[in-house]
Each structure stands twice: as structure tokens, then as C-alpha cells.
Image (cartoon, rainbow, N blue to C red):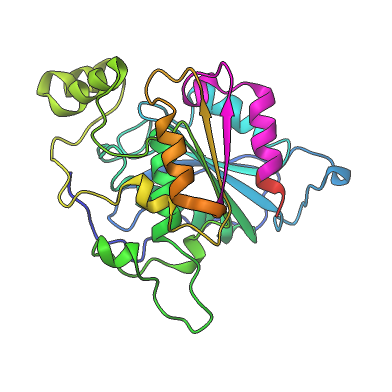
Amino acid sequence: MSSVSEGRFRSSAVPSITPGPLRTALRTDDGVRIEAVYEPCTAGAGAGAESSFDGTAIVLAHGFTGSVDRPAVRRAAGVFAGRAAVVTFSFRGHGGSGGRSTVGDREVLDLAAAVAWARELGHRRVVTAGFSMGGSVVLRHGALYARRPADGAEPGGAVEREGRTGARSEAHADAVVAVSAPARWYYRGTAPMRRLHWVVTRPMGRMVGRYGLRTRIDRNEWDPVPLPPVEAAGLIAPAPLLIVHGDRDPYFPLDHPRSLADAAGDGAELWLERGMGHAENAADETLLTRIADWAVTP
């Protein structure tokens, strides 16, 4: 699946103040139309909500085959909205968004557009929270879209390694949450991941993805291979990183979150959740509330 240059992108122009939920379309740097929804914080002023849009916004990145309107995504957004404003969106190839899924590669452009939109609305602090595939995307985004130094120099390191330039500082995340994220690409160590690879790599599998899972998948292989999540985790600091994983995750065993935490070192906090399965479908309200509380704490 082919990578593209992460330069400037076009996003929807919206009013700086809106009284309630707002649905719009964003345009990524490579011209893909992405559906997105903004929901203001539902907490009262005494709980820290700021009607002028200058409080924290959480940008929620769903897992593979998810979308902005899937029940699990809406449930997570509703819990998060009790602590902060929330931006949800459908990755390319999912839901009402255009394009085709590249299963974690070009999706970093989709996330960057959503983060920049939150900042256009006036939010001074933006936290990305990704689940499964979305978890790998927020990790790569955190490494590639770093806050620019005071001298205005372009970010290096991971950006240069992927041959990408122009990652704008207004698209950076102030903190990152990765839930049920893989540490490395091409993992086939569990039955669910072997089935997923069949869906992604085989013509019949992609047909099942399109008509059965409502996900349009790009047929091209990655070229070049994107920065692995485990390497990205070590490049996110000084932004805080929270890694959340269930001990009953059927997709990725516990060596994945532990590898991510080891790579990030002191820059990461690791929560291993007893009895939890995989991603947004398995995250209960108590866990989602804890994540939101972590996200809104500078």
C-alpha cells in the first residue's frame, strides 16, 4: 500500500462557534473526503467545560471496519464528551468517507485533518485516542506530526525516514492514547489476525470486506512500509502517551503493549486491563471514563 507525502491538507471551513453537534466533510492532503462529527463537551461549567471552545478536544480514531456512526464509536464518543469536546470521523474507505482503506498507512492524513479541524474550532489542547488500527495511526501521527521547535525547524527523524515533509504543527497532538494497538506490522500470530490478513490481501477477502464489512480496501501493497508502531512510540515524547490493552485481547497478545511501552520508556503509561477484549467494542464505560479523565489532565 503506497505512502504519500504528508504535506499541507485542505479542511472544511467552519464557524468558530457552534451550539451543538456539527457534521462536516474534511479534505486530506491527498484529496480524500472524510466525514467528521464535532460534539461539544456535555459537562457543566463546574466540571471544567468551556463554551468558548478553548478547552481540550479528544479526536477519536476507530478501528478497522468501524465508522463514525457505529454504535461502539458513538458510545465511546458519548462517554468522552462528558469530559471534553469530541471529534469523531470515518477513516478513508469506511462509512461515508471516500477513498479506500490502506489499513493504517495513509490514514495518518485523515487523523491529521481531524486534529487540525479541532484546532480551527479554537481548541488549544487536542488529544488523539485510537483503537486497534486507529491505535497504530495515532502512534504514527504522534511521531510524524510533532510540535515544531521554537526556531521553526521542520520535524525530522521519523518524518525524514518515511520521506515525508511539511507535517504542520497545528496538526500535532498534545497527548496520545493507543488502545488495543499492534506493536508491529504483518502480525499473524492469532486466528483473528490471520483472517484479517486474508480479508486485506486476497481479492475474495476484499470483496467480503466491501459487501460484508462495509469497508473498501486498497488492493496495493505498502510501498514503502510505514514506520512501525513500536518505533513510532519511541518518538512521541515529550507528548504524554497512554497505552491501554486487555489481557483477553484475541488479536494482539500482551507482548504488543509491553513492547510499545518499552520503546516509549518514561514517556508512556501502560494500563493492562483485566478481562478486557479488543478495542472500542470491549471498552466499557468505566474504562472510557478513566481514559477521558487522563486525556483532560495536562
Q: Classify the position of the N terminus by image quarter.
A: top left
Q: Is residue 278 magenta?
A: yes
Q: Where does residue 298 sit, x and y in percent of width and height?
A: 70, 55
Q: Is residue 16 above or below residue 108?
A: below
Labels in figure, total: 0
Observer able to see residue 26: no
Location of residue 85 by image quarter: top right
* Residue 39 occupies quadrant: top right
**Residue 173 appears at what percent x and percent y?**
53, 56
**Which region shows up in magenta?**
268-294
Whether 11 is drawn above or below 96: the answer is below
Q: Name the side, left or right, on which 126 lies relative to 277.
A: right
- Left or right of 44 in this view: 283: left
Relative to 96, 12 lies left or right: right
As drawn, is 32 to the left or to the right of 20?
A: left
Q: Is residue 89 visible?
A: yes
Magenta-colored stretch includes residue 269 = yes
Outermost residue, right direction? 46
Q: Position of residue 250 (x, y in %)?
A: 40, 17
115 or 24: nearer the viewer: 115
Q: Residue at horizontal 69%, vertical 31%?
A: 289
Q: Residue at x 15, y 28 (%)?
A: 201
Q: Position of residue 134 (x, y in %)?
A: 42, 38
Residue that lies at the very extreme toward the bottom in this rendered image: 151
Q: Which residue is depicted at the point 46% across and 81% down?
A: 152
